[in-house]
Image: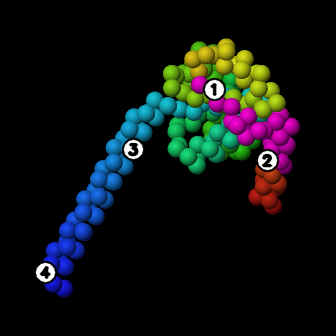
Amino acid sequence: MSRIKKSRAHAVGARKAAAKARVVADNHRMKEAIDVFFADRRIICWLTNDPASLVAAKCAIRANDVGNPLPLIVVAFAGHIRPSALALTMQWLQVPVVLVASPAEAARYCLKHDAHVIGVPVDEQARHTEYCQKYPDMEVISVLADRALTRADCVELVTRASVAMRLEQQALAA
C-alpha cells in the first residue's frame, strides 16, 4: 500500500475512532442524566383483595422489567389483603409485598417523585378521577385503562393464574 493510501486510511480510522469516542461520551452523559432524573423515582403498586389491583401490579412489574427499570415496591395495608392469599399473591407477582399497618407507615411510600399504580379498570375510570382529585400531588398511573382491561378481564386473568399455579404445585408435588 502506498504511503498516501496508508495516510488516508489512518486519517479515516482516526475520524471513526473520534466519532465513536464522542458517541460513547454522549451515551455516558445521557445515562448520567437519566440516572439523576430517576434517582428519587420509584413505582409504588397499591394492592388489595381486588383482582384489579393484583392485575395492575402484575402489569406494572412486567412493564418495569422490560423498559427502564425503576425501583418497584408492592404495598398493601395489612387489613386490606387476606393473609391466606398473600403467599399466592407474592408467588404470582414474583416480588415481595410490603405490609403496612397504618397511614403513617404508608406515608413512607408516598415520596414526591413516586408514581403510584392503583387497580382501576377501564370501566371504572370515575374512581381514577376521584382518586386523582383526592390526591392531586400524586402521580397516579392507570395501567389497566392503558391496556383497556375491564373488571371482568381482571377476574379472568387472576382466575387463570391461580389455576395455573395450583396445577404447577400439583406437578411439583407428584
Residue at numbered disc 1: 140
Q: Residue furthest toward the bottom?
A: 1
Q: What quarter of the picture does the N terminus occupy?
A: bottom left
Q: Count the numbered circles shown.
A: 4
Is disc 1 placed on a helix, strand or loop? strand
Report x, y in % for residue 86: 73, 35
Instruction: Check contact, mark 3 vs mark 4: CB within 8 A.
Output: no
Cα–Cα span, label 4 and label 2: 70 Å
Instruction: Check contact, mark 3 vs mark 2: CB within 8 A.
Output: no
Residue 89 visible from this viewpoint: no
Report x, y in % for residue 89: 73, 39
Label located before the other in sequence (4 or 2): 4
Of circles 3 and 4, the one toward us is: 4
Amino acid at dot 1:
Val
Cα–Cα span, label 4 and label 1: 66 Å
Report x, y in % for residue 15: 24, 63
Residue at numbered disc 4: 3
Quadrant of res 18:
bottom left
Of circles 4 and 2, the one toward us is: 4
Label located before the other in sequence (2 or 1): 1
Pick whichever, 19 or 78, lies toward us.
19
Instruction: Check contact, mark 4 vs mark 1: CB within 8 A.
Output: no
Which range of residues does the magenta coloring cover? 139-163
Cα–Cα span, label 3 and label 1: 26 Å
- Mark 2 burial class by Cα count in 10 Å: few <14, some 14-19, many 20+: some
Q: Which residue is drawn at 56% across and 22% down?
A: 110
